[in-house]
């Protein structure tokens, strides 16, 4: 029997010989993530369900990121409820200001290749970048997982996405995933897994694979999955020989196959106000902007800040443009400080904000005003996401964001 | 389990903002919110829906945000079940967890008329105008959640 990557992870999790797409199975959960926005609801439902202990407190991770630092007095309540829930049920894995949940779950090695992981956030698909099956759930379900260690899932059908060849200069993982979402549509991968393969994919860093896995949910995907390789082993701090074999069989039952030549991919943006409204940057050049945001769980890693710093080195953001840079974690923040990247960005006029979800989820750290336009590297451009509904959000790569900051209008990076 | 009710038809991509617009989410109780259900699309609908009625829709019902209030409101309106060609993933799970029965069916949404009656014998068939259409059984674990009245109640039953 031939299987897709996700099917192999689930077979291994269940210790069964065989499963197939659309089977409903109950998986054993290897790790869960709860963030500050939903912890009060999870805590309430958990006690209402009558549980007296967490199935395995060492497998739960609590991360404060959406409300850090607090921007309204009510925010503190979430931290207090989180702290007392953790105390009462012996959760030791708490991060109170270390960065964005999806970055920390991988950076701090909470997730390993082959794991089955759920989080109270739709972008939990990010962990597919290292070969884990991970997806978002509601707070009621999270409460049930905490009590039982299990969750039912429908084994997803898989779409195989193959990208071969060498990406042109200034074309990045962000452009690949935006192009894919444009081609699939915002519900094109609903219920399904997106399995990524091809020479271009194996050439990508783990950080770039995270960008693609993160945004896969914007096409409705339940999960994204990348085959673990030497880079995965190094990132996860495990021996290559010890990696589980998670590779989709060539003749497995894929529901759809999509092929791209890397050479034909161009810098693109998701235009207002849907993630599948994709246009080449070349067609958007010259649109005046008020703000640029480089950060988020999609594009706030060291390689993203490095790309931006290389473009901004010795230059300045346009006078009227507010350039906001948010490293995805404290660790990235430290590395960017040590390597001089922060200095370059600050000298170019950037406002550096603390690692967290702030601006991306529209809570703090650079909200826009009526009728303004922003070029941003995060994952959603829904109406009203970063301010009033009249704000136009253009999503693109860090390279396009940096080039646009200098010009004060949407611009392609210079070759 | 037999569900019989009058049909209300909705189209494709009924998103969670149509089911309950964001502006009403801050209300304290679901009961207060329910009269605004589907208001961007059909403001009169919530008042017309009677207990036991059935919603039939097209593709991707419940797409958009993960708000659990969306299925809670449909449940509060005492809709018997929602039949659609497909459901958005997080809505599907949130609905089951709140004890709202969903039926995926590829043919029914194209066959029916609003105001007519339809019956579903869960796990067996759907009956419409004396014709019967096969209905795949829901897995026992999901039926257990629905029959208990939602995931909180189902867990409570197990923990007692």
Image (cartoon, coloured by chain):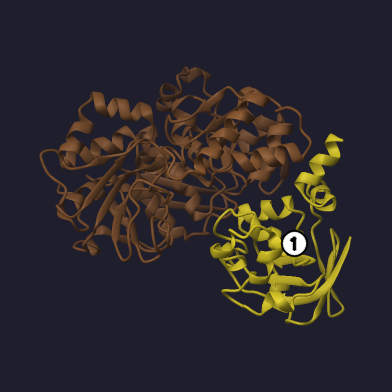
Chain colours: A brown, B yellow
Say left or right for A358 vs B99: left
- The residue under the point 53% across, 47% down is A122
Say left or right for A203 vs A237: left
Q: How many marks?
A: 1
Q: Residue furthest left?
A: A314
The residue closer to the viewer here, A285 or A19, is A285
Q: Chain of mark 1?
A: B
Q: Is residue A116 above or below residue A218?
A: above
- The residue under the point 68% across, 44% down is A140
Residue A228 can be seen, yes or no: no
Q: Circle 1 is placed at which residue position?
A: B75
- The residue under the point 38% across, 32% down is A329
- The residue under the point 68% across, 49% down is A22
Q: Is residue B18 above or below residue A387?
A: below
Q: Is residue A407 above or below residue B86?
A: above
Q: Quadrant of the N terminus of chain A?
A: top right
Q: Residue furthest front?
A: A73
Residue B50 can be seen, yes or no: yes
In percent of width and height, residue A357 lies at 42, 42
Q: Is residue B57 above or below residue B1?
A: below
In percent of width and height, residue B136 lies at 79, 58
The residue closer to the viewer here, A122 or B89, is A122
The residue closer to the viewer here, B66 or A79, is A79
Q: Alpha-carbon neighbours of circle 1 within 10 Å: few (<14), some, or many (≥20)?
A: many
Say left or right for A61 vs B111: left
**Mark 1, secondary structure of its residue:** helix
In percent of width and height, residue B151 lies at 76, 46
The residue closer to the viewer here, A46 or A235, is A46
The answer to which quarter of the image holds residue A297 is: top left
In percent of width and height, residue B76 lies at 75, 63
């Amino acid at each position: 029997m031939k299987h897709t990557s996700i099917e192999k992870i689930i077979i291994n999790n269940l210790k069964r010989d065989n499963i197939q797409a659309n089977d409903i199975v109950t998986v054993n959960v290897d790790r869960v993530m709860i963030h500050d926005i939903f912890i009060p609801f999870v805590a309430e439902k958990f006690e209402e369900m009558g549980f007296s202990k967490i199935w395995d407190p060492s497998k739960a991770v609590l991360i404060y990121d959406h409300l850090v630092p607090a921007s309204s007095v009510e925010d503190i309540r979430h931290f207090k409820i989180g702290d007392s829930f953790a105390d009462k049920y012996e959760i030791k894995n708490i991060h109170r200001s270390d960065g964005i949940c999806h970055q920390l779950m991988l950076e701090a090695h909470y997730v390993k290749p082959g794991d089955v992981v759920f989080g109270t956030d739709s972008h939990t698909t990010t962990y597919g970048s290292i070969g884990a099956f991970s997806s978002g759930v509601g707070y009621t379900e999270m409460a049930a997982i905490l009590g039982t260690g299990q969750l039912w899932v429908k084994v997803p059908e898989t779409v195989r996405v193959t990208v071969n060849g060498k990406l042109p200069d200034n074309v990045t993982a962000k452009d690949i995933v935006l192009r894919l979402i444009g081609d699939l549509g915002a519900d094109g991968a609903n219920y399904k897994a997106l399995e990524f393969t091809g020479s271009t994919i194996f050439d990508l860093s783990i950080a770039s694979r995270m960008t693609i896995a993160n945004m896969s949910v914007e096409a409705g995907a339940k999960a994204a999955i990348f085959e673990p390789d030497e880079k995965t082993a190094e990132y996860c701090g495990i021996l290559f020989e010890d990696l589980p074999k998670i590779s989709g069989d060539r003749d497995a039952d894929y529901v759809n196959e999509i092929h791209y030549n890397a050479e034909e991919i161009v810098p693109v943006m998701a235009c207002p106000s849907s993630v599948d409204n994709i246009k080449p940057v070349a067609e958007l050049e010259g649109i005046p902007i008020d703000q640029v945001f480089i950060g988020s769980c999609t594009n706030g890693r060291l390689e993203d800040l490095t790309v931006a710093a290389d473009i901004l080195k010795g230059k300045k953001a346009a006078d009227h443009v507010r350039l906001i840079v948010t490293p995805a974690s404290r660790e990235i923040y430290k590395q960017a400080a040590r390597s001089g990247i922060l200095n370059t960005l600050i000298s170019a006029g950037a406002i550096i904000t603390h690692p967290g979800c702030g601006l991306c989820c529209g809570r703090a750290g650079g909200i826009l005003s009526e009728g303004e336009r922003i070029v941003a590297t995060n994952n959603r451009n829904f109406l009203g996401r970063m301010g009033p509904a009249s704000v136009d959000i253009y999503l693109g790569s860090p390279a396009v964001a940096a080039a646009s900051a200098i010009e004060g209008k949407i611009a392609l990076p210079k070759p | 389990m037999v569900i019989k009710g009058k049909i209300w038809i909705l189209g494709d991509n009924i998103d969670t903002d149509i089911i309950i617009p964001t502006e009403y989410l801050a209300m304290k109780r679901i009961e207060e919110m329910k009269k605004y259900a589907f208001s961007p699309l059909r403001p009169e609908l919530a008042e017309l829906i009677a207990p036991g009625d059935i919603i039939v829709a097209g593709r991707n019902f419940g797409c958009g945000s993960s708000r659990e209030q969306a299925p809670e409101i449909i449940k509060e309106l005492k809709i018997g079940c929602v039949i659609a060609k497909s459901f958005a993933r997080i809505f599907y799970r949130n609905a089951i967890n709140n004890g709202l029965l969903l039926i995926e069916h590829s043919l029914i949404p194209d066959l029916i008329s609003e105001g007519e009656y339809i019956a579903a014998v869960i796990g067996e068939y759907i009956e419409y105008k004396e014709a019967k259409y096969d209905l795949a059984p829901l897995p026992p674990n999901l039926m257990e959640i629905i029959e208990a009245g939602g995931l909180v109640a189902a867990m409570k039953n197990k923990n007692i």
